[in-house]
Image (spheres, rainbow, N blue to C red):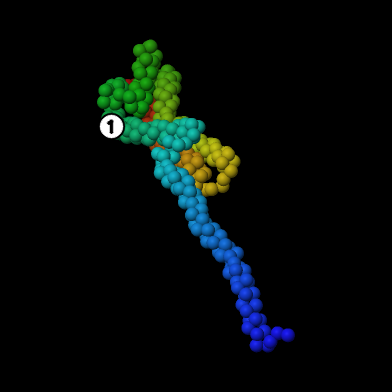
Amino acid sequence: MIDIKFKTPFIALIGAVALMASAPAFAQAPAPAAEAAAAVATADAAAPALTPAEPVAAAESADPPQMENAGKLTVMGMFGSATLVVKAVMIGLILASMVSWFLLVTKMIEFNGMEKVANGFMDAFRGAKNYSEAGRIALSEDFAGNPLADMAAAAVQEVELSRQAGLNISGEHRETTLHRAEGAVNAVQATLGKRLSSGMQFLASVGSGGPFIGLFGTVYGIMNSFIGIANTNTTNLAVVAPGIAEALLATGIGLFAAIPAVIFYNYFQSRISGFGGRSESFVAELMNSLSRQLDKGA
């Protein structure tokens, strides 16, 4: 039988040995937690290196096209980057506009000069004593080419030809002489109408067709923009905006050509009507003067 005094230290010794044997297991237990923390730290360290790279790359790839498109959105830039058909439409409308302005300048000079010479001729014609003197005034260099002077010269020439043919222009052949003189005046007047209306058809065509020609260029350009959307598979407005702007520029140029042409056409039509009324009044005055002088036996 073991003594109790000896038994107590023995039990304590066995307990100490058991604790020492179990100590490595407690020391090794936190290892999985340490490994997990190290893995998380490794992932966190790797994540910042990958995440910012994508936005930077996207920004670098997005900025150049925007800067490039912004540099092209000017009138000359849009014209230079337009398709061949749209360019042809723009060039044609610009040329039509230039011709319209050229017609404005030339016809204003023509009308102003013609009316100024006509005023001088009317004063000289009304001062003539007989139709022979009126004919010399009409054929003078000061009034050469003026429509009213040409009418007077044609009428006087016809009366003179009848007189030289031996016809009794103051008697039995008076009415036929006046009729032939009036026919000669009407022929000159018809030529005057063609002369004054020259260029009017062009202005009318530009005024009525310019917007539609520009609209054709716009439709063609927008069609190409939609084709570009289908090819790139993107609906980004920055991609298609330049093409649409180029297309709309064609309509703008069409209106720029058409609006002045319509204004010029209406302006010159009013002046043509005014001078036509003046020529009608002069024909009546001319025929009355011839009839009066034939009655006198001049």
Residue nearest the viewer, comparing 134 with 147: 147
* Residue highlighted by disc 1: 120
Count of number-bearing discs = 1
Residue 285 in the image, given as x and y percentages of width and height: 37, 31
Callout 1: SS:
helix
- Residue at 38%, 15% (x, y): give it: 162
In the rendered image, the quadrant that contains the C terminus is top left
From the viewer's perspective, is residue 72 above or below residue 15? above
Kindly identify the residue that appears in the image at 45 percent across and 37 percent down. 81
Location of residue 187 by image quarter: top left
Spot occupied by residue 84 in the image (x, y as percentages of width and height): 48, 31
Q: In which quarter of the image is residue 287?
A: top left
Query: Where is the N terminus found, in terms of image quarters?
Result: bottom right
Q: What residue type is labelled 1?
A: Gly
**Residue 258 can be seen in this image:** no
Residue at screen point 42% across, 28% down: 198
Residue 250 picture location, percent across and down:
47, 39
Count residues near mark 1 (Cα–Cα under 10 Å), then give few for <14, some for 14-19, many for 20+: few
- Is there any visible trace of residue 237 in the rendered image? yes
Residue toward you, 187 or 199: 199
* Residue 177 higher or lower than 259, as above or below: above
Which residue: 37% across, 25% down? 151
Name the spot of residue 58 as percent of width and height, x first: 49, 49
Residue found farthest to the front: 1
Closer to the camera in the image, 105 or 273: 105
